[in-house]
Image (cartoon, grey):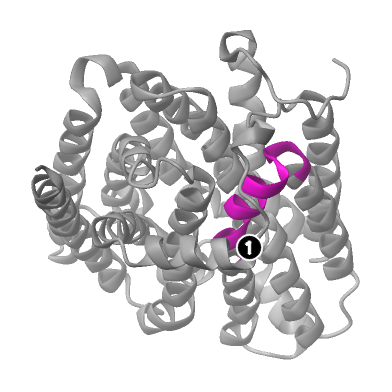
Amino acid sequence: MAISFQPVENPDSVNTHMLTWLLAACSMIGPFATDMYLPSFHQMAQAFGTDLEGVQMTLSAYLIGFAVMTLFYGTISDVLGRKITMVAGFVLFSISSLAAAFSPSLEVLIACRLLQGLFAGCGMVIGMAVIRDLYGGTKAQMLMAYISMVFGFGPALAPVIGGWVATHLPWQSHFFILTAISAVLAVLCLVLLPETLAKDKRTAPRLGVLITGYFHASHNAPFMTANTALALAFLGQGVFIAGAADWCVEVMHLAPSEFWKLFLPMVSGTVIGSWIAARFARRLGTQGSIRAGFGVMFAAGLLALCTMAGWLPSGVFWAVSPLTLYTIGIGIVRPGMALISMDYLPQARGLAASMQSFVQTIFFALCSAVIVPLLYGNGALYDLCIAGFGVITIVLWVLAMNMRLDHSNHAKP
């Protein structure tokens, strides 16, 4: 395929199978860069002469950078186009990954991880905007579900690769791998990614217009409540990701090469849930899929409470079973919740996708920096997060839908 930055005229001409795999790979780099180096936390702490909390700051810095820049990627792509923004993001991510590999101190590594975070969000944000540019309704939900399903293999592979690296290679090897992956993604996007935003639909690059757009989006109560619900849903899983070094080693007494015993069931749940969302999209509809997923998440919360009470057998399998069920629920609800949220801003879906990713990532960053250290060494508190965040998610989503209905009724003449 020849390299082209011209907008695609006919969505039917786009190879959806190729697009699914490409956007899944592009979205994957963010969580891949989060998960892969977690098994080396103890090695890095020893190398830099610090404790686990000090190394945890490299993750928090990455997530803060990720959150801040995702706020702008959608808007930048609304101005410049989807393709050029995606390619530039991966080129800069590759450079910052290489810099991280050569960090002489923990402080420099934290700064490099911040830079990595700034450039890692392009795939996730712009990928959602590309889908919404091309398709609507059930087809968009199905495509997002399939992308989530393929995307799930990245976090599953990350700790397996990371565990092998932590066992056989120095910690710098994680960042050399990320350098190579992001360089390949930049080339693939340059060659294969279609430009989906026509020039006449792009936003004028005026600061006042952009500020106004963010102001209206942040003051759209149903939109922000829905985004918050989606962000909190992920935190039931996110505490285990951010706290993997503690949960695996201190709580479950696993070796770095055994981190897959946490991540494989967790990611398998996401893949299964995404497959269910895609398979039954037409039969259940968007809201029906969300209700079904909430039922699964609520059941996972009850199972987590049983684990806390000591009613389940001991062992890693039973310890991760509530989390696996919870991630199935997330896989089911996430495509529909994301689409409904973006549809609150139909004229600025790039901005909507940015705001959505920003809210999710900033909550994850705060969770990593503030909540996870409070859980250290206590498996029961990790389980409590599954139950607690699941219930809060359901309550906020119901509230968002009621606010949306009230807004629609007030808008009628």
Q: Which secondary structure lies at badge 1?
A: helix
User: Which residue is at 43% across, 55% downward?
Assistant: 356
Question: Residue 222 placed where, x, y %?
Answer: 24, 56
Q: Say if 306 sits above or below 261 in the image.
A: below
Q: Mark 1 points at which residue?
A: 39
- Reply yes or no: does residue 83 show up in magenta: yes
Question: Residue 144 placed where, x, y %?
Answer: 45, 30
User: Which residue is at 29% across, 20% downward?
Assistant: 281
**Amino acid type, callout 1:** Pro
User: Which residue is at 19% across, 60% downward?
Assistant: 387
Left or right: 73 as drawn, with respect to 44? left
Left or right: 253 as drawn, with respect to 402? right
Front residue of 327/69: it is 69
Q: Say if 344 sits above or below 199 in the image.
A: below
Residues shaded magenta: 69-84
Front residue of 3/234: it is 3
Left or right: 288 as drawn, with respect to 59? left
User: Which residue is at 86% across, 44% downward?
Assistant: 183
Front residue of 86/187: it is 86
Question: Residue 263 placed where, x, y %?
Answer: 49, 49
Q: Which class describes the residues within 10 Å of circle 1: few (<14), some (14-19), or many (20+)? A: many
Q: Let me know if residue 240 appears in the view.
A: no
Q: Quadrant of residue 413?
A: top left
Front residue of 347/97: it is 347
Question: Residue 357 placed where, x, y %?
Answer: 49, 56
- Reply yes or no: does residue 385 show up in magenta: no
